[in-house]
Amino acid sequence: MTQPTPQSERRRAPRAAASFSVSLSSDSVAEPALLRDISEIGMACDAPAPIEEMTMVGITFSLPGQVEKHQVTGAVVRCDRGEDKDGRPQWDIAVYFTEITPVTKAALKGYVSRGKIV
């Protein structure tokens, strides 16, 4: 019996598990979100409100143990409804970074290299 061919990894950059707050803003409204994973090119988080796919968002965050605030811009590429541990609605939001400074990209590369790769 032949074994199925493993699917190749579709992600273009390694990502690390993360569990810290970020701020997502679109149309001058900022919403808190809890990061689940992050890479040099994108992130996934749980948010209390939906954001329509292809919406451009601003993201502000500080990496754990650092005080420097990073700001990036990205496009929402996924927004799926789910529930938190108490059964309240929450949204699984994935963002592809479209504007990121070299300093932030280097900081994320360092964070991912030291983190638990997922």
Image (cartoon, rainbow, N blue to C red):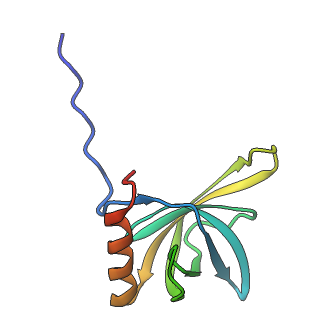
Q: Is residue 3 above or below residue 42?
A: above
Q: Residue furthest left?
A: 2
Q: Residue at x 44, y 69 (%)?
A: 42
Q: Which residue is at the front of the view, 19 or 73? A: 19
The one nearer the camera, 116 or 99, is 116
Give the residue displayed 72% in from the left and 75% down from the top: 31
Q: Is residue 41 left or right of residue 3?
A: right
Q: Is residue 117 above or below residue 61?
A: above
Residue 91 in the image, given as x and y percentages of width and height: 68, 57
Q: Residue furthest top?
A: 1
Tell me residue 4's x, y (percent): 24, 24
Image side of residue 33 versus residue 41, left or right = right
Q: Residue at x 30, y 63 (%)?
A: 13
Q: How many marks?
A: 0
- Please state, as top left, top right, bottom left or bottom right, where the N terminus lies in the image: top left
Q: Position of residue 11 (x, y in %)?
A: 33, 57
Left or right, 90 with respect to 95, comes to right
Nearer to us in this view, 103 or 11: 103
Relative depth, front residue between 38 and 54: 38
In this rendering, the answer to whether 97 lies above or below 6 is below
Report x, y in % for residue 67.
54, 86
Q: Residue at x 48, y 66 (%)?
A: 43
